[in-house]
Image (spheres, rainbow, N blue to C red):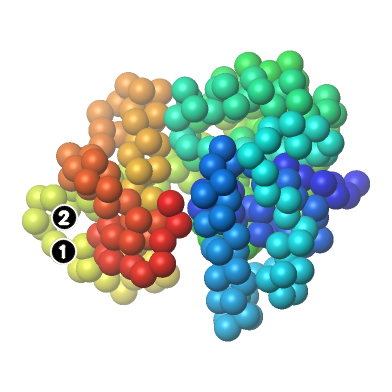
């Protein structure tokens, strides 16, 4: 089946990437955020991303920015999600923020609509428990930048049906992506490993073993990684790294997930990485 009309909740870095990718693959998108200012920043970011894709000829087949944005309806009204067939939620990695969102959209969206939780650590089963459609809730851990990534981690919650899983994989296929299905444990596969790596790299900088640049050079030069762990942390957002580690620490009660004090200090100081303009490195354009 073709999911022609898709809801995207949250117009931060991930929500913008998902909405852009969907519009570039001929989906009509309803992009919802509580802030008009954030929606304005989202439009600017999409225009910039499409311009950069044109330079490098990467990502899904693209039209010009005006054509892509014409497929995205930006709104602050949850009620505009009343006719979507598939919904991707992208709000911050905090249960107390996500939980009321699901209670609201569960009342608004058609009962057949599939909910995809875009999360790197939060339990899909727990998220589904606040809805009246737990069999139609699935995890989708998109990677940043979404339009340039060809694979997505798909998480099966306890009640997620086979029909929903198949629908999720077909949906990703429409976006030009492959899905890999894993089971629902906090952090899943990617972030259960990646968060440890980034956190330990931050400990290395904190303990003055090496500079951020040299830590990343070792991973790129010795292991062939395209990005080092600290560059990756800046790309994801250091606030998201901290939130994910706190979820993992609470979920497993294991000290290996304790966040580095330096990570906490940087987040408290507003040094979040690319989206704030400065993290372990300095950047130009930002998207809060």
Count of labels in the image: 2
Q: Residue at x 77, y 45 (%)?
A: 6
C-alpha distance separating marks 2 and 1: 6 Å
The residue that label 1 is drawn on is 211
Among the 4 quarters of the image, the one containing residue 166: top right
Q: Is residue 29 left or right of residue 39?
A: right
Left or right side of 46 for 280: left
Q: Residue at x 30, y 34 (%)?
A: 257
Q: Secondary structure at mark 2?
A: helix
Picture residue at 68% right of the left edge, 59% below the top: 21
Q: Nearer the viewer, residue 28 or 21?
A: 28
Disc ID at residue 205: 2
Q: Is residue 149 visible?
A: no
Q: Nearer the viewer, residue 224 or 106?
A: 106
Residue 4 is situated, as x and y percent measured from the top left of the image, at 85, 49
Q: Is residue 285 above or below residue 243?
A: below
Residue 90 figure quarter? top right
**Left or right of residue 151: residue 67:** right
Q: Are marks 2 and 1 in contact (CB under 8 Å)?
A: yes
**Residue 124, x across and y down, in percent:** 59, 28
Q: Most extreme residue toward the bottom, as rendered? A: 55
The answer to whether residue 271 of the structure is visible from this angle is: yes
């Amino acid at each position: 089946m073709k999911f022609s009309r898709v809801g995207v909740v949250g117009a931060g870095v991930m929500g913008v990437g998902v909405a852009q990718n969907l519009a570039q693959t001929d989906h009509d998108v309803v992009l919802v955020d509580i802030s008009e200012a954030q929606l304005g920043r989202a439009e600017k970011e999409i225009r910039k991303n499409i311009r950069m894709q044109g330079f490098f000829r990467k990502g899904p087949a693209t039209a010009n920015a005006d054509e892509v944005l014409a497929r995205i309806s930006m709104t602050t009204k949850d009620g505009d999600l009343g006719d979507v067939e598939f919904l991707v939620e992208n709000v911050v990695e905090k249960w107390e923020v996500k939980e009321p969102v699901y209670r609201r959209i569960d009342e608004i969206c058609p009962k057949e609509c599939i909910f995809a939780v875009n999360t790197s650590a939060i339990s899909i089963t727990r998220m589904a428990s606040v809805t009246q459609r737990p069999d139609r809730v699935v995890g989708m851990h998109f990677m940043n930048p979404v339009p340039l990534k060809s694979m997505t981690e798909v998480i099966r919650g306890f009640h997620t049906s086979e029909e929903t899983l198949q629908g999720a994989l077909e949906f990703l296929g429409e976006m030009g992506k492959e899905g890999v299905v894993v089971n629902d444990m906090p952090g899943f596969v990617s972030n259960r490993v990646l968060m440890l790596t980034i956190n330990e790299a931050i400990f290395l900088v904190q303990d003055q073993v090496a500079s951020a640049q040299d830590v990343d050079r070792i991973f790129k030069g010795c292991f062939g990684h395209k990005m080092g762990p600290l560059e990756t942390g800046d790309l994801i957002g250091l606030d998201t790294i901290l939130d994910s580690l706190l979820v993992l620490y609470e979920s497993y009660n294991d000290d290996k997930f304790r966040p580095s004090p330096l990570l906490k200090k940087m987040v408290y100081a507003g040094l979040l990485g690319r989206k704030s303009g400065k993290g372990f490195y300095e950047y130009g354009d930002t998207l809060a």
